[in-house]
Amino acid sequence: MSTLNLHTATAISNRALAVGRELSAAPLTVAVLDAGGHLICLQREDGASLLRPQIAIGKAWGAVALGKGSRLIAADAQQRPAFIGAVNALADGKLVPAPGGVLIRDETGQVVGAIGITGDTSDLDEQCAIRAVESLGLTADAGIAG
């Protein structure tokens, strides 16, 4: 697989929402982007708050744009706030430096997209993203040792 299609993106999103229900998460919003940072699929559960779509997209977009999971971007924001602030200014504010944005890699290790989830704690958002991607036989790259 060298590209992420609508069928796969929707399957990932559906699985992420199912994992969220299994874990009794707060209402989630899930965004799946292709490797170019373009939105393929967005789902917002009933009860999810107003800015959740933008936050989910921002987590995924940051992962694709910087080539690493948003957990690492959040760590960068703490260690190098001026740098991440400058990057976010260059990105017109699209970057959300909080866990929950995970790169999606195919069987060859190539980045084919990213998933961003928001709604619960960032750690739980990230867990839902990882489990959803891996349930489809793809590799979830959150930038953490696993």
Image (spheres, rainbow, N blue to C red):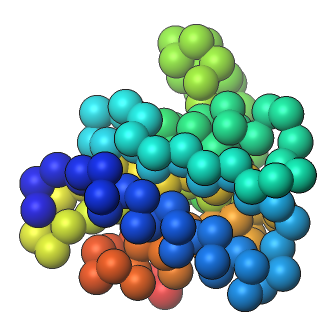
Quadrant of res 125:
bottom right
**Residue at the image point whose x is 64% and y is 18% from the top:** 93
Please name the residue shown 53% across and 67% down the image. Answer: 14
Q: Residue at x 37, y 31 (%)?
A: 38
Question: Looking at the rendering, which quadrant does residue 20 occupy?
Answer: bottom right
Q: Is residue 139 visible?
A: yes
Q: Is residue 131 above or below residue 41?
A: below
Q: Describe residue 84's horizontal placement relative to residue 48 as left or right.
A: left
Say which quarter of the image contains residue 77.
top right
Q: Seen in the image, is 20 located left or right of residue 72? A: right
Q: How many numbered dots are placed on residues in this image?
A: 0
Of residues 132 and 36, the one drawn nearer to the viewer in this rendering: 132
Q: Nearer the viewer, residue 31 or 7?
A: 7
Image coords of residue 109 (percent x, y) = 18, 67
Is residue 74 something one can see in this rendering? no
Q: Is residue 57 left or right of residue 55?
A: left
**Horizontal side of residue 108 vs 103, given as left or right:** left
